[in-house]
Image (cartoon, rainbow, N blue to C red):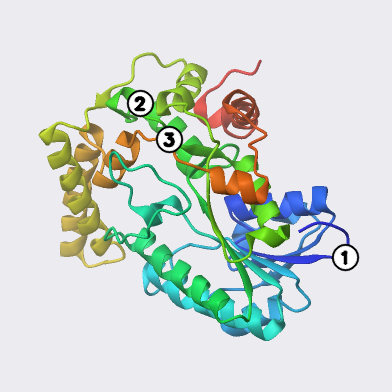
């Protein structure tokens, strides 16, 4: 979307992707932006902008309807776990509520932020926007498959324009999964590469992703389509994470070989111990608490040696994803390469995490 007078709603605008999208819609598109807030404690960052903050939870259809009043475009970026039902509840019931509210409010277009995980990529298979949706058995990715099908059905019904954006692995300032996590693990001595970090990362810098999101809200050619979004470059995981290690003054980093049976076994052991630990969280009885401590100790020991099965497959996947659909239809051309994105990221890390990470001021 573009131009003054256009009102956009960003659901999930207190988060990493939604927050940066809202900020740039205001600063660069001169859009009137409304942001839903489920937890006001997380609204500190977005409150620095001129966005209108309103209460809203995708599990509450009435709050979605109120938030969408007079909105032209809705960007659905929310995907945290519901208090009951986990990701499946958020992404199935929540997306159902969002779609119904969009239709009732007369919203022109819904842009849904999905994930590359809906493809459950297998080695040797090159991903593109046309790759099939596959169930993986993981709550998060399977719930996104369900949500995408709901969005597609809404478009086919003729009552709502829709676009689906599938980001890959989003890095940059404020990224908890592909920036701050790696820095903290390196600092703690628990970070490990898979296959020496030599596989193609297929990651996407946050502002490149936001460029694609903004274009998807405006392009008449994008209606009813879905787009895989990466940085469009063949840099490796080592290329992406090595600057973090240099920043921290860390030399050699251990690696887990994905092809070894021991790595696969270890990954499954991490999976099972993590699942068991999750089931014990919140239990307060003394016997359960004792069991939980034992399970956590086992899980932590396993995590020091192995990575879970999902991460093992993710970091071993070595095919360059095809983003030609986004280039052709959206006019998407990644403006930030690895070097420029990393320069901005390191500046942010020094400013926001310097004390925590023990970085000297320069």
**Sequence order check, earlier mark of 3 and 2:** 2
Q: CA distance from mark 2 to mark 1?
A: 47 Å
Q: Residue at x 50, y 21 (%)?
A: 243
**Residue closer to the observer: 27 or 147:** 147
Q: Position of residue 212 (x, y in %)?
A: 64, 49
Q: Quadrant of the C terminus?
A: top right
- Residue 210 shows up from this direction: no
Q: Quadrant of the N terminus?
A: bottom right
Tell me the crowding category of disc 1: few under 14, some 14 to 19, or many 20 or more residues within 10 angstroms, Cα based: few
Q: Position of residue 236 (x, y in %)?
A: 43, 26
Q: Residue at x 35, y 24 (%)?
A: 198
Name the mark on residue 73.
none
**Sequence order check, earlier mark of 3 and 1:** 1
**Residue closer to the observer: 122 or 197:** 122
Name the mark on residue 5.
1
**Residue closer to the observer: 198 or 300:** 198
Front of the two marks 3 and 2: 3
Q: Where is residue 34, by image quadrant?
A: bottom right
Is residue 146 rendered to the left or right of residue 206? Answer: left
Say which residue label 2 marks.
Answer: 197
Q: CA distance from mark 3 to mark 1?
A: 40 Å
Q: Secondary structure at mark 1?
A: loop
Tell me the crowding category of disc 3: few under 14, some 14 to 19, or many 20 or more residues within 10 angstroms, Cα based: some
Say which residue label 3 marks.
Answer: 320
- Residue 329 shows up from this direction: yes
**Residue closer to the observer: 254 or 136:** 136
How many numbered callouts?
3
Q: Where is residue 110, by image quadrant?
A: bottom right
Q: CA distance from mark 3 to mark 2?
A: 15 Å
Front of the two marks 3 and 1: 3
Q: Position of residue 219 (x, y in %)?
A: 71, 58
Q: Position of residue 244 (x, y in %)?
A: 49, 24
């Amino acid at each position: 979307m573009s131009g003054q007078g256009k009102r956009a709603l960003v659901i999930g605008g207190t988060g990493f992707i939604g927050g940066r999208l809202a900020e740039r819609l205001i600063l660069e598109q001169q859009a009137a932006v409304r942001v839903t807030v489920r937890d006001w404690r997380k609204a500190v960052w977005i409150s620095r902008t001129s966005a209108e903050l309103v209460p809203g939870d995708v599990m509450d259809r009435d709050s979605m309807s109120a938030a969408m009043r007079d909105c032209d475009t809705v960007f659905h970026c929310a995907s945290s776990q519901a208090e009951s039902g986990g990701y499946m509840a958020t992404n199935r019931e929540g997306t159902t509520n969002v779609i119904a509210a969009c239709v009732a409010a007369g919203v022109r277009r819904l842009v849904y932020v999905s994930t590359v995980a809906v493809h459950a990529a297998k080695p040797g298979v090159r991903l593109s926007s046309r790759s099939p949706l596959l169930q993986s058995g993981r709550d998060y990715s399977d719930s996104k498959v369900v949500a995408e099908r709901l969005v597609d059905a809404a478009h086919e019904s003729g009552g709502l324009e829709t676009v689906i954006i599938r980001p890959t692995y989003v890095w940059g300032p404020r990224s908890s999964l592909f920036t701050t996590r790696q820095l903290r693990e390196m600092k703690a001595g628990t970070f490990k590469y898979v296959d020496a970090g030599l596989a193609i990362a297929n990651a996407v810098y946050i502002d490149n992703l936001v460029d694609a999101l903004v274009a998807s809200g405006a392009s008449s050619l994008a209606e009813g389509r879905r787009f895989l979004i990466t940085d469009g470059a063949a840099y490796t995981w080592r290329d992406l994470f090595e600057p973090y290690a240099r920043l921290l003054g860390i030399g050699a980093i251990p690696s887990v070989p994905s092809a070894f049976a021991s790595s696969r076994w270890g990954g499954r052991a991490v999976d099972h111990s993590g699942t068991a630990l999750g089931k014990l969280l919140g239990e307060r009885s003394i016997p359960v608490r004792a069991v939980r401590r034992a399970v956590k100790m086992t899980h932590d020991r396993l995590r020091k040696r192995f990575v879970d099965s999902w991460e093992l497959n993710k970091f071993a996947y070595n095919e360059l994803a095809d983003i030609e659909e986004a280039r052709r239809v959206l006019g998407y051309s990644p403006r930030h390469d690895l070097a420029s994105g990393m320069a901005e990221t390191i500046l942010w890390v020094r400013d926001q995490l310097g004390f925590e990470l023990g970085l000297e001021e320069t």
